[in-house]
Image (cartoon, rainbow, N blue to C red):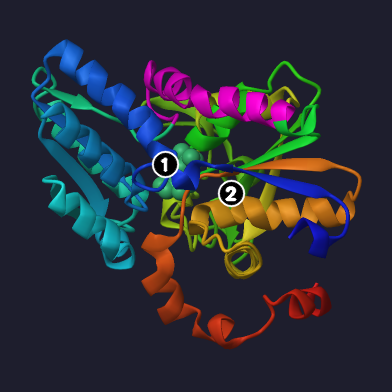
Amino acid sequence: MSERIGGARIYLKREDLNHTGAHKLNHCMGEGLLAKYLGKKKLIAETGAGQHGVALATAGAYFGIPVEIHMGEVDIEKERPNVIRMKILGAEVVPVTVGGRTLKEAVDSAFASYLSDPVNSIYCIGSVVGPHPFPFMVREFQRVVGIESREQFIEMTGSLPDDVVACVGGGSNAMGIFSGFLDDPVELYGVEPLGRGAKIGEHAASLSHGSEGVMHGFNSIMLKDADGAPAPVYSVASGLDYPSVGPEHAFLSSQGRTRIATATDEEAIRAFFQLSREEGIIPALESAHAVAFATKLARENPARSILVNLSGRGDKDIDFVMEKYAAFVEADFATAAGARSED
Ligand SMILES: Cc1ncc(COP(=O)(O)O)c(C=O)c1O
């Protein structure tokens, strides 16, 4: 892919190769350990793409603690393989039927369930969002991605990357990898989902288009409707359609330490096919947003080395992509020659 783009070197941190197929297991094992230490009897969480749900169901099975996962009906339909995995792993999947029936409503529902029995249960949140200490805790569990990447990058190339790129839903994979490079002269890019366009309701690019507010117990930048309530959001990637981002992302971008970029649905789908066909790696639709932006950056900056957090693999997305993007499957744009002419 780097050769095709012409100059810039793109490196992937392969979190997609983790057990359960995404970075989510890093914080779920930490949350499972914490629950065991605290003597909790139930793990409760939300899930969007199902990756956090599967990872937590796995941690629950490993530590012998029952798991309850709240998931919007829209996502249940879209991410069927992960719903089946959670059930096989012994988790209870609670369908959420209100509002937009996606990630935000799943968080509402999981919080409500947790608050009905906070003594015996623990909320194992799926990203660097929510009230303290969740954003801090999840970042610390994900920090391993940054530590490993930094070491491995220096080992492979003898120097630091120029740019680090990660997709941002709530922001856990991005905070994980960014943590390894915060004190280095490295540009950090968080890529938000621009969905079908910049109109409210058509995307979930919270930092790019939002303003300060409070939601789910934390103060950050968020997308709001005319009444100041969380706005409806949309992205082709279920794990990215959340109307806010972790507070540390809001802080880092306000300080100019991180840069915010976007990728549309269509750019992400193109990147999904390009990485599949040029490297033999099927990325998660979430991660495809980071790949899409990295290819753009690489094209414009041929001298740079770019590290992308490939946060997950795309097995969960294949039925959805085949159904909704059949035209892309037939198109030969993703072959090397086709991609060049399309670019
Ligand atoms: C593979 C993958 N990447 C990224 C995300 C987005 O979450 P976060 O921004 O917390 O990394 C998800 C969420 O489900 C995911 O499954």
Q: For the magenta stretch, what is the residue range?
A: 128-155
Callout 1: few (<14), some (14-19), or many (20+) C-alpha neighbours within 10 Å?
A: some
Element class at badge 1 = loop
Residue 313, image x, y percentages: 46, 54
Q: Earlier in the sequence, mark 2 or mark 1?
A: 1
Residue at the image position 73 percent from the left and 25 percent from the top: 257
Q: Point out residue 91 in the picture as x, y percentages from the top left corner.
A: 14, 45
Amino acid on which the number 1 mark rests in the picture: Asn
User: Left or right: 151 with respect to 67?
Assistant: right
Of 134 and 210, which appears nearest the observer? 134
The kind of residue tagged 2 is Ala
Looking at the image, residue 134 sits to the left or right of residue 33; the answer is right
| Location of residue 268 with respect to 113 vertically, above or below | below
The residue depicted at 80 percent of the width and 41 percent of the height is 305
How dense is the environment of label 2, judged by Cα within 10 Å: few (below 14), some, or many (20 and up)? many
What residue is drawn where x is 47% and y is 58%?
237
SS for callout 2: loop
| Residue 205: assigned label | 2
Nearest to the observer: residue 158 or residue 87 = 158
Classify residue 54 as left or right of residue 211: left
Location of residue 263 with respect to 110 vertically, above or below? below
* 143 falls in the magenta region: yes
Residue in the picture at 60% in, 55% down: 289
Viewer can see residue 307: yes
In the rendering, at what x and y percent does residue 205 appear? 58, 49
Reply yes or no: does residue 57 show up in magenta: no
Answer yes or no: is residue 171 visible: no
Residue identifier under label 1: 18
Q: Dominant secondary structure of the magenta stretch?
A: helix
